[in-house]
Amino acid sequence: MILLDRTFDLATPLRHSSAYNALVQDVFGLHNNRAAFKTADGKPATFSVDAHDELWRGNASRPFPEVADAVDAAL
């Protein structure tokens, strides 16, 4: 028997991976390897995520906490 708090969401980790590429897809909605978002001032912006992007190429399938460390190291 497993007892869980009612606020614990067990379904989400089973449906969604915590890998960087899956999270970018879920949050930004990749389309043709481009992610769209709005800047702080409300203007639309896009960025490309493809084989030419070194951060994407090296970290797309890694868990997000590891990618956060890689971003810190790159900066």
Image (cartoon, helix red, strand yellow):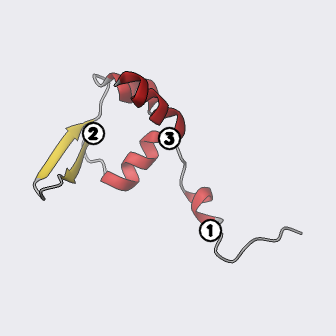
Callout 3 amino acid: Phe
Where is residue 22 drawn, in percent x and y?
45, 46
Query: Do residues under tags 2 and 1 come within 8 Å of each other at their CB atoms?
Result: no
Q: How many angstroms separate mark 2 from mark 1 (CA)?
A: 30 Å
Give the quarter of the figure containing the N terminus.
bottom right
- In the figure, is residue 41 to the left or right of 28? left
Residue 33, labelled with which disc? 2
Earlier along the polypeptide chain: callout 1 or callout 3? 1
Where is residue 75 drawn, in percent x and y?
34, 25
Mark 1 nearby-residue class (10 Å; few <14, some 14–19, many ≥20): few
Q: Which residue is disc 1 drawn over?
A: 9
- In the depicted view, which residue is nearer to us: 7 or 51? 7
Q: Which residue is disc 3 drawn over?
A: 64
- In the figure, is residue 65 to the left or right of 9? left
Earlier along the polypeptide chain: callout 3 or callout 2? 2
Residue 20, labelled with which disc? none
SS state under label 3: helix
Number of the front mark, 3 or 2: 3
Mark 2 nearby-residue class (10 Å; few <14, some 14–19, many ≥20): few
Q: For the point 38% across and 46% down, which residue is it?
A: 24
Q: How many angstroms separate mark 3 from mark 2 (CA)?
A: 19 Å
Number of the front mark, 2 or 1: 1
Earlier along the polypeptide chain: callout 2 or callout 1? 1
Above or below 15: residue 35? above
The image quadrant that residue 47 belongs to is top left
Callout 2 amino acid: Asn
Query: Do residues under tags 1 and 3 come within 8 Å of each other at their CB atoms?
Result: no
